[in-house]
Image (tube, helix red, strand yellow):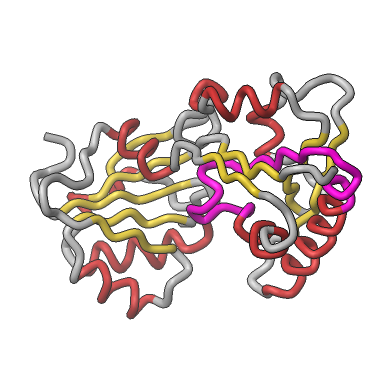
Amino acid sequence: MVGKLYGVGLGPGDPELMTLRAHRLISQARVVAYPTLAGGESFARAIAADVIPTGAREIAMDVPMSTAREPAQAAYDIGAADIAAALEAGDDVVCLCEGDPFFYGSFMYLFARLSTRFEVEVVPGVTSITTCAARAGLPLAARNERLTVLPGPLPEDELRARIEGAESVAIMKVGRHMAKIRGVIDGLGLTSRAVYVERASLPQEVVCPLAEAPEAAPYFSMILLTKGADPWL
């Protein structure tokens, strides 16, 4: 009998934001897989640490943080092979993914490698965008308004053009692109409409107007921008 693969969204970081289904699947898991960053700790595992059963087998996938695609793709190849071996042995595998598996989630790369060979169920999670909006007290879209989601690594010209044509914007993966993003927003005269959120839902959370944001931003940070009413009124 072949096992089933579950891609489980864990939410943005606070374990209490895991769904009941995610909690149940993890608590019953015999095999748990998750990504780690360059041999370091796994953020996904840290979220679920109190739920993972004692004695569960753990498959850690060491995914390097690099702008080059090849090293990460090779890591997912290795991880997919390890997961496939567990599935073929008859074990279900619960793969942990911070946020939502199909929204900039690492699980989508495993899904592409394994979904044609094994039964896969994707369990959605609370996204970082909705969490940041909630923590900032900033409604993002109503009625027929549009929300545009942009990754911070976009080239400056493209970032500017997309923000100009948008109504509400969520800029993800800020990190080392903070100076470029701030410059674009300031050049468009929209700094007063922008909110900075760092490590939403975690004890180290920071929420403030973009004008007061730190110069250096971690990977888990976001800028929310609305062109309607002042976001702090």
Q: Is residue 109 left or right of residue 70?
A: left
Name the quadrant containing residue 57: top right
Viewer-closest of 171 and 49: 49
Viewer-closest of 215 and 193: 193
User: Can residue 181 be found in the magenta stretch?
Assistant: no
User: Can residue 105 be found in the magenta stretch?
Assistant: yes
Q: Determine the residue positioned at 52% across, 42% down.
A: 99
Check the image and report above or below for 191 versus 150. Answer: above
Q: Determine the residue positioned at 63% across, 44% down.
A: 7
Q: Determine the residue positioned at 28% across, 48% down.
A: 211
> How far across and how far down the image is residue 112, in percent?
65, 64
Q: Is residue 131 left or right of residue 38?
A: left
Name the quadrant containing residue 24: top right
Check the image and report above or below for 233 versus 68. Answer: above
Viewer-closest of 187 and 136: 136
- Magenta region, residue range: 85-107
> How far across and how far down the image is residue 132, in percent?
37, 39
Q: Is residue 209 left or right of residue 75?
A: left
Q: Determine the residue positioned at 31% across, 38% down.
A: 133
Viewer-closest of 59 and 220: 59
Quadrant that contains the N terminus: top right
> How far across and how far down the image is residue 194, in percent?
25, 50
Count of all numbered marks drawn on residues in the image: 0
Q: Is residue 95 left or right of residue 136?
A: right
Quadrant that contains the C terminus: top left
